[in-house]
Amino acid sequence: MLYTILKAVHIIFMVSYFAGIFYLVRLFVYYKDSDEFKEDKKQILREQYVFMARRLWNIITVPAGIIMLSSGIWLIILNFGLMKTPWFHLKLTFLVGLGIYHFWCWKKVLLLKTLQGQNIAMSNLKLRQSNEIATFILFLVVFTVILKSMVLEYWWQLITGFTVLVVLIMGTVKLVNRKKNKI
């Protein structure tokens, strides 16, 4: 029963964490979008985006990430047999990627605070594409967990499907960004 409750807690806080990460990077995009406004409006918006990003990071994303990580560690402790399964190693590899992305987001939150209304050095398109990285990691983790041992059996179909997904999403981001710039 404890294992099932911990799994539910893990899933709930995984959803909360990803919601925070998705919205956080969207706030970086909005901050960058404010480049187009007059100085007074730009300053007001940027102060608000920095405030929102810091609150989102400190009140939702990091606490949800800590609970997600803690419950995940407890799940491993209670079922150490997971460490013997190849699909779980693959999941852990993707989670290392999520950790790197988390660190990148944290550095951007700190950067926003120090910019004090100045421009972000990244292009709007790169920020929008960076916003999709968490989506890709989420797809990889969920498909790995759901398919488990079938991941190894059907790896080439999964890689092909994932590659198509990445190309479609990144292409859509480029197309939307191009149309946005024409308006």
Image (spheres, rainbow, N blue to C red):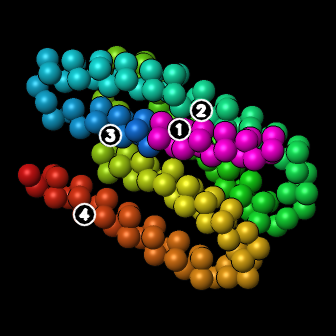
Q: Which mark is residue 16?
A: 1
Q: In the rendered view, does 32 fall on the left or right side of 108? A: left
Circle 1: residue type: Ser
For disc 4, the neighbor class at 10 Å (few under 14, some 14 to 19, many from 20) is few
Mark 4 vs mark 1: which is more N-terminal? 1
Residue 180: say if magenta.
no
Which is more foreground, mark 4 or mark 1?
1
Q: Which residue is mark 2?
A: 64
Kind of residue at disc 2: Ala
Point 67% across, 79% down: residue: 155
Label 1 with label 2: CB-CB less than 8 Å: yes
Q: Is residue 96 left or right of residue 55?
A: right
Q: Quadrant of residue 171?
A: bottom left
**Which residue is labeled 3 in the image?**
29
Residue 91 in the image: x percent, y percent?
71, 58
Q: Secondary structure at mark 2?
A: helix
Residue 49 location in percent, x, y?
32, 25
Query: Mark 3 or 1, which is nearer the eye?
Result: 1
Foreground residue among 18 and 74: 74
Q: CA distance from mark 4 to mark 1?
A: 29 Å
